[in-house]
């Protein structure tokens, strides 16, 4: 029951299972695994697809013939495993040229380079049939606001996305663009730090319908926010285009831990939300193995992400089928029915009637909501006690 299969739509980035364990204090601890090997192994484990940044696949300094060989070998691996490439993205953070940002750098040459690199990377993604294009603005930020007026940064960011939306149309690519918010790291503060900032920004673009979100568990958790609420708001706005699943302790650096490894309860409610909404997007794991691991640990990590998702999905179904839980939920959903104003359109008559309505405030004030009972039952489902 917990065996991942392609129809579950689990995907990984080349950069996730390919992570060599470099950190700001230490050198790589694992050797790089070639893209075709990653594809073979993910296929064996039951994943649906693999995603990449331009440079994960084709190094920046590759010659034309090296590039052709890399693409040929990668394509062959995709063909023999049946793995898809649902998403592609641009590395706009490794090259020192991007130290002041990419689309929001003060230097117009850097902003041009960022556009050039993104267009080339969009071309590469389309060679493999990618449908979603992610924008993670990791370097789009500052350490000091002396650097630039943040209104200029917003304008440059908007100009770049408007330009790339037109490129998307002109090329007939039909990509869905997904902005990925993050509060900080690697910049001191990053622009568009939360789901809410990004949602509001999208509405200022020339083609808001083309642009949505790629929220990540770790990024909202770093900021101390409730990720499930943010994802629900993106769903409500029709803007959940992609999702980065992983795990994270609040108040830490960007840990990108195995999905479900830290906060089982929050991730349970996240999986329940995605499954209850019948969201049909990719379940992408943007995470990596602990730095202590060898290659076996990497595959244990990847298998664990998918298995935990499937376990939490089963727990959500159990929660939805639990008679006692559902009785409490029904009571909550129907409480005070008839007296409320839900779904009632404004009319002067309705407003007048509502102003005169007698509400039993003493009873309302005295009632309890039974959330202690409901939450305990939830914990018992999660702990396997019911
Ligand atoms: C991070 C980000 C990145 C992006 C990736 C795809 O915090 O490191 O989550 O992993 O998701 O660059 O755009
Ligand atoms: Mn990260
Ligand atoms: Mn992250
Ligand atoms: Mn991410």
Image (cartoon, rainbow, N blue to C red):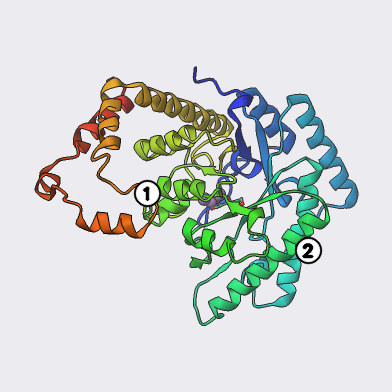
Determine crowd level at label 1: few under 14, some 14-19, many 20+ residues with C-alpha closer than 10 A.
few
Determine crowd level at label 2: few under 14, some 14-19, many 20+ residues with C-alpha closer than 10 A.
few
Which residue is label 1 attached to?
A: 344
Q: How many marks?
A: 2
Check disc 2 and report its element: helix, strand or loop: helix
Check disc 1 and report its element: helix, strand or loop: loop
x and y, in percent, of residue 94 in the image: 65, 59
Instruction: State the residue at coordinates (38%, 56%).
Output: 346
x and y, in percent, of residue 17 in the image: 60, 38
Residue 19 appears in the picture as rendered:
yes
Which residue is label 2 attached to?
A: 116
Q: Nearer the viewer, residue 379 or 304?
A: 379
Q: Quadrant of residue 117?
A: bottom right
Q: Nearer the viewer, mark 1 or mark 2?
A: 1
CB atoms of marks 1 and 2 within 8 Å: no
Residue 251's place in the image compared with 232, above or below, is below
Q: Quadrant location of the C terminus?
A: top left
Extreme residue toward the right, this view: 65
Left or right: 241 in relation to 257: right
Q: Nearer the viewer, residue 317 or 361?
A: 361
């Amino acid at each position: 029951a917990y065996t991942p299969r392609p129809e579950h739509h689990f995907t990984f980035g080349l950069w996730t299972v390919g992570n060599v364990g470099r950190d700001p204090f230490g050198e790589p601890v694992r050797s790089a695994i070639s893209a075709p090997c990653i594809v073979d192994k993910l296929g064996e484990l039951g994943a649906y697809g693999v995603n990449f940044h331009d440079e994960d696949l084709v190094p920046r300094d590759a010659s034309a013939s090296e590039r052709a060989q890399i693409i040929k070998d990668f394509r062959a691996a995709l063909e023999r495993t049946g793995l898809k490439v649902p998403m592609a993205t641009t590395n706009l953070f490794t090259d020192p040229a991007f130290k002041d940002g990419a689309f929001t750098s003060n230097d117009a040459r850097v902003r041009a380079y960022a556009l050039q690199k993104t267009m080339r990377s969009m071309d590469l993604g389309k060679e493999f049939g990618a449908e979603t294009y992610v924008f993670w603005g990791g370097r789009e930020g500052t350490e000091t606001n002396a650097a630039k007026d943040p209104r200029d940064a917003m304008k440059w960011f908007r100009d770049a996305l408007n330009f790339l939306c037109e490129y998307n149309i002109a090329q007939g690519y039909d990509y869905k663009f997904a902005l990925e918010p993050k509060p900080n790291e690697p910049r001191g503060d990053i622009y568009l730090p939360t789901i809410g900032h990004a949602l509001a920004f999208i509405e200022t673009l020339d083609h808001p319908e083309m642009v949505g979100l790629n929220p990540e568990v770790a990024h909202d958790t770093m900021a101390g926010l409730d990720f499930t609420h943010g994802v629900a708001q993106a769903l409500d706005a029709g803007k959940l285009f992609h999702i980065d699943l992983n795990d994270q302790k609040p108040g830490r650096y960007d840990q990108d831990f195995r999905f479900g490894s830290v906060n089982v309860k929050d991730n349970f409610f996240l999986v329940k939300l995605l499954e209850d909404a019948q969201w049909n997007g990719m379940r992408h794991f943007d995470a990596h193995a602990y730095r202590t691991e060898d290659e076996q640990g990497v595959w244990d990590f990847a298998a664990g992400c998918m298995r935990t998702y499937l376990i939490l999905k089963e727990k959500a179904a159990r929660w939805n089928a639990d008679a006692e839980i559902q009785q409490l939920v029904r009571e909550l959903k129907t409480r005070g029915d008839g007296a409320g104003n839900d779904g009632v359109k404004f009319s002067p008559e309705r407003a007048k009637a509502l102003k005169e309505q007698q509400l039993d405030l003493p009873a309302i004030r005295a009632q309890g909501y039974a959330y202690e009972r409901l939450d305990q039952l939830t914990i018992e489902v999660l702990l396997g006690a019911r």
